[in-house]
Image (cartoon, coloured by chain):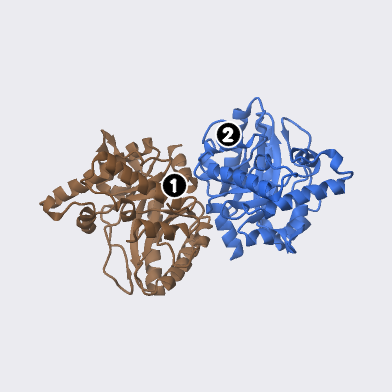
Chain colours: A blue, B brown
Amino acid sequence: MQHTEMLAQLVGGAGFVAALDQSGGSTPAALKALGVGEDMYSNEEEMFALMHAMRVRVLKAPSMNGRRVLGVILFERTMDAQIEAVPVPRFLWQRGIISFVKIDQGLEKDKGGVQLMKPIPGLDSLLSRARSRDVLGTKMRSVINVASHRGIGDVVRQQFELANHILDQRLVPIIEPEVNIASATRDECEKILLGELSNALDGQSYGRRVVLKLTPPVTDGLYAPLIAHPNCARVLALSGGLSQEAACAALARNRGMIASFSRALLQDLRVQMDDAEFNETLGRAVERIYLASTIKQLG
Amino acid sequence: MQHTEMLAQLVGGAGFVAALDQSGGSTPAALKALGVGEDMYSNEEEMFALMHAMRVRVLKAPSMNGRRVLGVILFERTMDAQIEAVPVPRFLWQRGIISFVKIDQGLEKDKGGVQLMKPIPGLDSLLSRARSRDVLGTKMRSVINVASHRGIGDVVRQQFELANHILDQRLVPIIEPEVNIASATRDECEKILLGELSNALDGQSYGRRVVLKLTPPVTDGLYAPLIAHPNCARVLALSGGLSQEAACAALARNRGMIASFSRALLQDLRVQMDDAEFNETLGRAVERIYLASTIKQLG
């Protein structure tokens, strides 16, 4: 029943998905944006500890609850951690929030205009741990830089191969083929991607639904056929380096897409803030992204 | 493409569905509630003309647009009519609203605790007319009065048999097995109905999605498995004789359900109002039902 309730929330709930899965190479930059300079840690372990503390602060904030935030995408270490002696995904579900875990290990170098995902050693053990921890699904990201039919086909093929493996493990995959917002041929990339995703969804057998996480398209409403597709559980929008304001504006022009923002959610938070200011700042961001996701109103 | 855009709006749009399909036996009562006494018409044709005029007034109101109202359920005569020399469904789609047409011809007498639908003569001609007029789908209603497994099974079987015929005609069926809000065994009715609907949805083959229109259940969130089901495009809530305030409150307790209200939408409108008052009154109702459908906020 818990799985069904989580799925109903994902498919039909009003709200958005918070992405708290920055990791690896992007951690120093993420920390810097949060007011944590490189002088404030002396090794990787300390760096991860600071990032983890910041994530816990976010996850414990009063605005992070299932009435606004349908789900959270967690970094693997966060999934394995506890808050107030409760495993993080269970802590979140007690507040009405579904958990997803980021599974990819970063990107290959650009080849033919796209960046595929690196191999993921230990994937099955991660998936089985996720399932045992009340995690509903996974997230994995590739990048599209150039409007190449072949390259975009490769990206979608790799994503769906992995997605089907994840579905076999009874988890719901979030497929994120990010179109680089700086691409000179972005509109064309998005139209090719729409075709490839439509074909891939057509090829899924009954009941094997996936979630898509996409760059809000240049052409408003472009992804309507994906939103309408019976094998698509929900369509999320990434913020792709846009500011909160710009990301919300792009999202609000696309009906049926809800946010899954990372930097655009956390941009105004600083580690130096006291709890009141921190929670109020996050609360404002949550409300604004919630309204842009649901009733497409800009705050 | 139009069909896909309509479907995406139905599946993923923020908003609700207005039910303007009162007809036949319920017209005098509907007119009376709108301030039109039986002394104001002398035969059936005049009565229908008054009702039609009222519906046109509603459909032309500024608040009736696709940003709030995803769809409208029309009475057959309204579907065949024109507004400003444009067929009504096309007039509505120009304002971003999807059309459905009510197809049932009313209810049989109670038998075994339920009321099945009467035979529908001329159904195929109605369906083909609907399709030619840019109508996305249909609506049909039966009623459940008593918690009888056999009776509720019969209701669901009849609904899905017809639904599959409608799907064959490339229209999207709204299935409305209304649980009588006054039933002494309402909670039990709803639990049996959930089981029967789940089985029926399981039995649908791939891509043959239906819309469900249900009484907001006594047990909050009861219908989550239907909302999560891959063969369910959307779950609507009927107002079943509740006031706007009570219907919105019941709806707001059920995440993933959106309104499809009739009386609860129109309750404060009177034929005697001038356009400004009429449009303002309807606008307030639309806003209130919109917020209860989407962000579950009560106005």
Q: Which residue is mark 1?
A: B15
Q: Nearer the viewer, residue A92 or B75?
A: A92
Rendered image quadrant of residue A244: top right
Q: Amino acid at mark 1?
A: Gly
Q: Give the residue type at disc 2.
A: Pro
Number of residues whose C-alpha sits closer than 10 Å to that of mark 2, classed few (under 14), some (14–19) or many (20 or more): many
Residue sitting nearer the eye, B237 or B117: B237
Q: Which mark is residue A217?
A: 2
Query: What percent of the width, then of the height, locates residue B266?
Result: 30, 51
Q: State the image coordinates of residue A285 (x, y, percent, origin top left).
A: 61, 43
Disc 2 to disc 1, how far (Cα)? Answer: 22 Å
- In this view, the residue in front, A72 or A155, is A72
Which quadrant of the view contains residue A265? top right
Q: Which mark is residue B168?
A: none
Tag 1: Cα neighbours inside 10 Å, few (<14), some, or many (≥20)? many
Q: Residue furthest right?
A: A42
The chain carrying label 2 is: A
* The furthest residue to the left: B42
> Mark 2–mark 1 contact, CB under 8 Å?
no
Q: Position of residue B82 (x, y in %)?
A: 26, 38
